[in-house]
Amino acid sequence: MGRDTSTKLNIIQAVPFFGVLDMGVSLQFYLNGLGFIMTNKWTPRGTIEWCWLQRDGAALMLQEYRKEAGAPVEKRGVGISINFICEDALALYHEFTAKDLPASEPFVGNNMWVTNLKDPDGYCLSFESVSKVPEGTTYSELINEGGR
């Protein structure tokens, strides 16, 4: 039986879902640090246990591990990388570092400016934007050459 390709699109968005140890710490990072806004939340016991965060066209969900179930003993975030494709990754780098977030120095990889940081649970977040600068160039090299 073949799939009918004439119907409208069914899958409209993929949203990362992160298990977190401390919702308060994660919300501080994502809301105050990265500038996301909370658009939905679940508070079955009077505190936020799950939420949907949005910034521009990107979304993610956070859920705190329940104390009685326990958090996984494995290191969280290993092998997980979320890439946010942006209009201007360098502007985000300046925004994040102005808030004392440890964003990595931007560099050009795969024809894109890339800056990375990790969230409180170790998830790798990459912010990338298209660049015409030569591959491998770092932001400090570009600044020293007087360009952007």
Image (tube, rainbow, N blue to C red):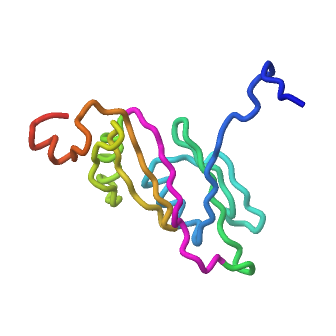
**55 lies above or below 43:** above
Q: Residue furthest right?
A: 1
Majority secondary structure in the magenta region: loop
Residue found at the very far top of the displayed protein = 6
Which residues are drawn in magenta?
A: 71-87
**Magenta span has 73?**
yes
Look at the picture and state if 42 lies above or below 88.
Answer: below
How far across and down, in percent of the image, does residue 76 sit?
55, 70
Q: Quadrant of the N terminus?
A: top right
Residue drawn 63% across the image and 65% down it: 19
**Nearer the observer, 75 or 46:** 75
Residue 85 is inside the magenta segment: yes
* Total tally of numbered discs in the picture: 0
User: Picture coordinates of residue 136 (x, y %)?
Assistant: 24, 45
Q: Is residue 94 above or below residue 80?
A: above
- The residue at the point 68 percent across, 48 percent down is 40
Question: Residue at position x 27%, y 47% from top?
Answer: 107
On the picture, is 145 further left or further right than 34?
A: left
In the image, residue 137 sits, relative to residue 81, either above or below, namely above
